Structure formats: structure tokens, C-alpha cells
Image (spheres, rainbow, N blue to C red):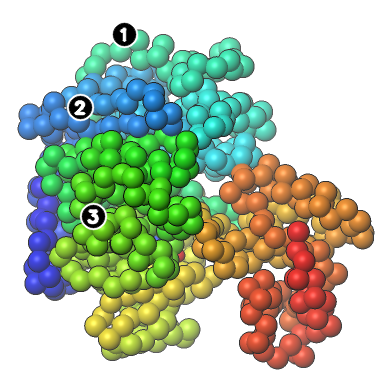
């Protein structure tokens, strides 16, 4: 078990040690795991190529550490607790021993279907325990999982399958989400119809039992492939730097990229950060409301908690079904001790009124967590007072798909906290703020671009199939630094406050989206000539999507056109990328070199017209007036 920090002083000492002797610090944490062979060297790195290796030549399997290792000590304790969408349906529980056997059976089933070390397996599945079982089974045999959030469209799924040449998709028939019944398998069928030549098998988990179309020769039922499989399967012995998973995420340009994480460093950091950030104690029930389709679900529903031997809850439903009290009803029902969610959910529930919270006994909650986007002061206070009764410290956790684990956060009950501040770097994390030229901003009370100057164990290693893209996106902006894409402030006492993205990435309800990606989708509409997408402040979602669109003819029925555009975006990416506001314009403000002036578009979308700046040097200054006028009534 890695070290758990209990006091502010201990935190300061641990951080200091991790900077002065990073190799010693992380070796000490890594010692607590099961290795088939210890590493020869802890770390080799450079941020130029980039090339980062942790626990060099160490041999292990992450599932032996998440499962086998716990059998003697906590085999009969609950590992996964599953709360279904329907509050009256049956809760499912898997003890560590049961989970171990299910994962082993599935591992054998995957092998029987021709999956081996290094193969890519795509998951397109709702929040059911089988998703966790499948992911762990993949890791057990040394294959690589690529989980795609089951809200993405068939097109988006096909793109991701093809980018990493997945051999198999694992899915469910349908997914109950709130009052909806989503035809998940049908979306997989549609994706495969678009052309995914590498897919040889589709494993279908029977979730709701509703009818589905069946592709003979391709589709197999989960329960049938599992049948008769032995419930033990030797874990493939892997190198610490072998790939564990790919997770696609959006950037400011082009298509989403497959962020690659490797086994050893990710394992050590996931467990270390989980234990310290959530201050998990034996017997606690921990609940992270994220979806496993995002990095939060990977690290803090599956890997972190299971590596730590914790009881982790998976929730199939949504916060507002059957009503806006659901989260709190579930917290009471399962006596949740650590609750981790996103500011968007907090704001949405806050808007429904305190009465939805007040009827429930939330006294079991010891720690509250927030993730995915900046948390505004009002939401922070509500979370603290109405949910936590000022008794449960808040961990505002800042991190990214690329960082693999939480990098900056308060340690609940250990360090101090300050509303809207993520606060302190975890041990091993060396943040630095720079100005636009890359000069370090020293001292406190400064604001700049957030970078990291030293690798932590779970830093991304590459972007799948395109190492140059990894270099140019994260490591080329400022020499020798990892660039996060976020702007941040450091206060007088060294606490960090994350302000938000400084690139063309927007964060809508905690979902990360590239503006270019949404523009490409909009441009698929036959009447669209050009478009520009920006984020604007949104009360609930944090940011909303604002699309400026140039069409090839005068659109007479704007509502119909907007509906069509939203349908195109839903088809190309998924409903999460639908523009909230659409404005048809005759032109976009451009510089003389033809670059769209997004700064102006962002200000207009935010109704922040006082600081538009000088527009006279634009190629087409006249268009700005028109855009301002039209922004009064977007559709
Ligand atoms: O802008 C930051 C924001 O989310 C981005 C990373 O998104 P993603 O890779 O999808 O991972 C989200 C879950 C870890 C960051 O660049 N972000 C994440 N957490 C916070 C945050 N912004 C402010 N405060 C946070 N706590």
C-alpha cells in the first residue's frame, strides 16, 4: 500500500522529497505492488522527443495488483457495487473473489476469440459491471482497451475503431438511461456498416433483453462466450512500459487523438492518487459518478479504487431520474463516504432547489470531489453547505486525459481549501506558469499558462499511431515543458486556480470538445459554406457551443435549418456536441492573412462587447457590426 498523507506538514515533506529525489520517492510507492521482476531503473525521460519511461524493465500485470493481490486479505469484501438506473431494480455486488473469477473467465473467452497481447479491443457499453469486467479481462491478457463513451455517434465510433485497428467490439443490447432505452448495439451495427474491416467479433452483453438485429458470424453473446470458460487465467506478464489503454480525446485541431497510457507508471499513480485524494479507509463506500467512457471513470472508478482494494460504486443512471434527488437518495441508500462528481451536475442539481437534498441523510459523506471543469464559487459553496453540511472537505481535482491521474488538488482534511482553487500539486507533480513566450513566472500572485516541468508516472506516452502529433501538441510549445492547454493563477500562498483552456478546446458539461471537430461536422451540411464555433459562458454547462455559420443561400426557415444542423452534428459526433446557439452570418471576421478572429467571435457570443478591441485592421471589418446585431437572436 502506497503512503497516505495525513497532515499538511507531511504533505509538504512528501512533495519536497518527490522533487529532490523523484526516483527514490516513486520507487518507494512502487515497492508496495506485486512485480514479477523489479525494475532496473526508475526513470528515463526527455520532453524533447518526447520519451518517458518509468520502472524500466519491470514486469507485472495490473490485474494481479487489482484483483489477485487482494484475495487473501479481502476476497469476500465488495469490490464493485452496482446501482441500476431504476431505483427499484436489483443492486448487484461483486466481491473481490467474484470479480476475480469473472475477469478470469472473460480473459479466457477473449483468448478463445483470438485476442492476444497487444491487440486492441473497443468497448462501447453502458455503465454495467460487465464493462469493468471486460476492461480488466483485456488487461489480464495483455491486450489494449479503447473505451468509447456510449454517447458518441456511429460515425465517431467507427473513426475510433479504425484509428487503432481494433479487432473486437464489446457492447450491450440496450442501455437504460433515465426514461430512455438507447439502442447501443444498433449504433455498433451502424458503425460497422460504415466500414471497420479489422473487427472480427462483436461480443454483446444482454442488458435489457430487448430485441436486436443479429449478424451471424460476427456477433456472439457475452453469456455464451463465457459459458464453460475456466475461472482462472494466468495473467500475461507485461513490461511496465507496455500499453494498457488508448482513450480518445479532443484537441484544438483535427480528429480526436488516441492518448496512450502504459502499465507500470499508470498503476502506481492511479493507486497513490486515489488513496491520498479520497482519503479512503477500509470499509468505506466510494462513488464516482463519471462514465467509464472518460478518463475519470478509467482511473477513479476502475483502476485506482480496485488497486487500493476499495469498494467502488458504478451507477447506470442519470442525476435527475426518477427525480432530482437521485444522487442523494443513492448516497443515503449505500451510505456513501466519498462522493466525486462534476460541477455541471452540481449546478444542475443546485438549480432544482435545496429541497431535493434535504430529505436525505448524507451524514456518511466524509469527502466531496469535483472534476472536469472549473467550479464556480456559488456551486462550490452549495456543494460545501447543502451537500457536505460544511463537514466534508472538497477536493477540487484538476487533471486531464493525458495526465492519467489527478495532478492538482486539495487533500481533504489534510491541506487547506479555498473555493474555486484546485490548490496544491500532488507529490511528484511540478507545475510551472509561463508567459506566452515561455518565460517562467516566478513567485506568487501570478497568472499564466500551466505547464509541467517534470514527468509524473502516469503521463501519456504517445498518441496512437502518431508520435509527432503528441510532440507537437504537448511538448513543442515551450521547450522542455509539458503544456496543458490551461491557463492558471497562483495565489499568494502558492495555491493554483485553473481558469480554463487557452486553446480551441471547449468544455461543455465537463465534456471536452475541439471547436474544429464541431466545425467539420457542421460543414457536412450541404448548404454550409463555412463555420466557426466558439464556447460561451453557460449557467449550467459551464460552456455552451455557439456556431456562426455561412450558408450558400438565404435561409428562410431558420428553425428548420438549425434543426438540420443539430442533426448533422449528432450524426457526426453525438448529441453532446450539438450547438446551443446557431447564428447565420454573411461572413466571418478575418485577418488580412485569412485567419478567423475567434477572439471577436467569443466576445460577441458572451455579449462582452466593451472590449472588442480594434477591428479596423480586419480584412472585413463591416461584418462585425452585422454579427453583433444578429447575436441578439441566435437560434
Ligand atoms: O481544462 C481542464 C478541465 O478539463 C480539461 C481536461 O479534460 P479531460 O481530458 O476530458 O479530462 C477531464 C477529467 C479529468 C483540462 O485541461 N478540467 C479538468 N478538471 C478541472 C478542469 N478545469 C478546472 N478545474 C478542474 N478541477
Q: Mark 3 Cα within 10 Å, few/some/many (few <14, many 20+)? A: many
Q: Nearer the viewer, residue 149 or 45?
A: 149
What residue is shown with label 3?
A: 367
Ligand 1 shown in quarter: bottom left
Separation of residues labelled 3 and 2 (CA atoms): 24 Å
Task: State whether residue 438 is above or below residue 602.
Answer: below
Q: Mark 1 Cα within 10 Å, few/some/many (few <14, many 20+)? A: few
What residue is shown with label 2?
A: 95
What residue is shown with label 1?
A: 228
Q: Percent x, y for residue 411?
A: 21, 63
Q: Residue at x 16, y 63 (%)?
A: 413
Name the quadrant containing residue 94.
top left
Q: Nearer the viewer, residue 165 or 614?
A: 614
* 539 displayed left or right of 603: left
Q: Residue at x 65, y 29 (%)?
A: 190
Q: Nearer the viewer, mark 1 or mark 3?
A: 3
Q: Percent x, y for residue 99?
A: 24, 26
Q: Percent x, y for residue 353?
A: 45, 54
Q: Nearer the viewer, mark 3 or mark 2?
A: 3
Q: Secondary structure at mark 3?
A: strand
Amino acid at each position: 500500500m502506497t503512503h497516505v498523507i495525513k497532515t499538511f506538514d507531511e504533505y509538504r515533506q512528501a512533495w519536497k522529497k518527490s522533487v529532490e529525489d523523484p526516483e527514490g520517492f516513486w520507487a518507494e510507492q512502487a515497492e508496495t505492488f506485486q512485480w514479477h521482476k523489479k525494475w532496473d531503473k526508475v526513470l528515463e525521460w526527455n520532453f524533447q522527443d518526447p520519451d518517458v519511461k518509468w520502472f524500466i524493465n519491470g514486469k507485472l500485470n495490473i490485474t494481479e495488483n487489482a484483483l489477485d493481490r487482494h484475495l487473501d486479505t479481502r476476497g469476500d469484501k465488495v469490490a464493485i457495487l452496482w446501482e441500476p438506473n431504476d431505483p427499484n431494480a436489483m443492486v448487484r455486488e461483486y466481491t473481490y473473489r467474484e470479480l476475480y473469477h469473472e475477469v478470469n473467465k472473460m480473459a479466457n473467452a477473449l483468448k478463445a476469440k483470438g485476442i492476444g497481447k497487444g491487440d486492441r479491443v473497443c468497448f462501447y457499453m453502458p455503465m454495467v459491471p460487465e464493462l469493468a469486467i471486460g476492461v480488466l479481462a483485456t488487461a489480464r491478457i495483455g491486450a489494449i482497451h479503447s473505451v468509447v463513451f456510449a454517447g458518441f455517434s456511429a460515425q465517431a465510433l467507427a473513426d475510433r475503431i479504425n484509428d487503432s485497428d481494433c479487432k473486437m467490439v464489446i457492447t450491450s443490447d440496450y442501455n437504460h438511461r433515465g426514461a430512455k432505452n438507447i439502442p447501443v448495439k444498433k449504433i455498433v451495427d451502424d458503425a460497422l456498416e460504415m466500414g471497420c474491416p479489422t473487427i472480427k467479433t462483436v461480443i454483446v452483453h444482454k442488458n435489457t433483453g430487448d430485441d436486436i438485429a443479429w449478424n451471424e458470424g460476427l456477433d456472439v453473446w457475452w453469456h455464451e462466450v463465457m459459458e464453460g470458460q475456466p475461472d482462472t487465467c494466468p495473467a500475461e506478464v507485461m513490461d511496465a512500459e507496455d500499453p494498457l489503454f488508448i482513450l480518445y480525446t479532443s484537441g484544438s485541431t483535427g480528429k480526436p487523438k488516441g492518448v496512450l497510457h502504459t502499465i507500470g507508471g499508470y498503476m502506481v499513480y492511479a493507486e497513490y492518487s486515489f488513496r491520498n485524494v479520497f482519503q479512503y479507509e477500509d470499509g468505506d463506500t466510494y462513488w464516482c459518478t463519471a462514465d467509464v467512457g472518460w478518463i475519470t471513470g478509467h482511473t477513479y472508478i476502475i483502476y485506482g479504487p480496485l488497486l487500493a482494494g476499495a469498494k467502488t460504486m458504478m451507477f447506470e443512471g442519470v442525476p435527475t431520474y426518477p427525480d432530482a434527488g437521485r444522487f442523494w437518495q443513492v448516497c443515503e441508500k449505500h451510505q456513501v463516504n466519498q462522493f466525486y462528481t462534476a460541477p455541471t451536475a452540481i449546478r444542475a442539481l443546485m438549480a432544482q432547489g435545496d429541497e431535493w437534498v434535504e430529505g436525505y441523510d448524507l451524514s456518511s459523506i466524509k469527502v466531496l470531489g469535483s472534476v472536469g471543469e472549473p467550479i464556480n464559487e456559488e456551486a462550490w459553496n452549495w456543494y460545501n453547505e447543502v451537500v457536505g453540511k460544511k463537514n466534508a472537505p472538497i477536493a477540487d481535482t484538476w487533471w486531464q486525459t493525458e495526465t492519467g491521474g489527478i495532478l492538482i488538488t486539495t487533500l481533504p482534511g489534510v491541506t487547506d481549501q479555498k473555493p474555486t482553487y484546485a490548490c496544491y500539486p500532488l507529490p511528484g507533480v511540478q507545475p510551472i506558469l509561463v508567459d506566452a513566450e515561455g518565460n517562467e513566472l516566478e513567485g506568487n500572485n501570478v497568472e499564466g499558462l500551466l505547464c509541467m516541468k517534470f514527468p509524473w508516472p502516469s503521463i501519456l506516452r504517445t498518441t496512437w499511431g502518431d508520435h509527432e502529433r503528441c510532440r507537437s501538441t504537448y511538448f513543442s510549445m515551450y521547450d522542455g515543458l509539458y503544456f496543458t492547454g490551461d491557463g492558471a493563477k497562483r495565489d499568494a500562498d502558492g495555491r493554483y486556480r485553473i481558469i480554463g483552456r487557452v486553446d480551441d478546446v471547449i468544455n461543455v458539461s465537463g465534456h471536452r470538445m475541439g471547436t474544429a471537430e464541431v466545425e467539420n461536422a457542421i460543414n457536412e451540411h450541404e448548404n454550409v459554406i463555412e463555420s466557426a464555433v466558439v464556447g460561451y459562458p453557460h449557467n449550467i454547462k459551464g460552456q455552451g457551443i455557439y456556431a456562426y455559420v455561412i450558408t450558400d443561400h438565404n435561409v428562410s426557415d431558420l428553425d428548420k435549418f438549425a434543426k438540420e444542423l443539430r442533426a448533422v452534428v449528432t450524426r457526426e459526433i453525438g448529441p453532446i456536441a450539438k450547438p446551443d446557439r446557431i447564428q447565420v452570418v454573411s461572413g466571418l471576421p478575418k485577418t488580412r492573412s485569412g485567419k478567423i478572429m475567434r477572439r471577436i467571435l467569443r466576445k460577441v457570443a458572451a455579449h462582452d462587447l466593451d472590449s472588442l478591441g480594434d477591428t479596423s485592421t480586419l480584412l472585413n471589418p463591416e461584418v462585425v457590426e452585422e454579427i453583433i446585431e444578429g447575436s441578439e437572436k441566435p437560434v
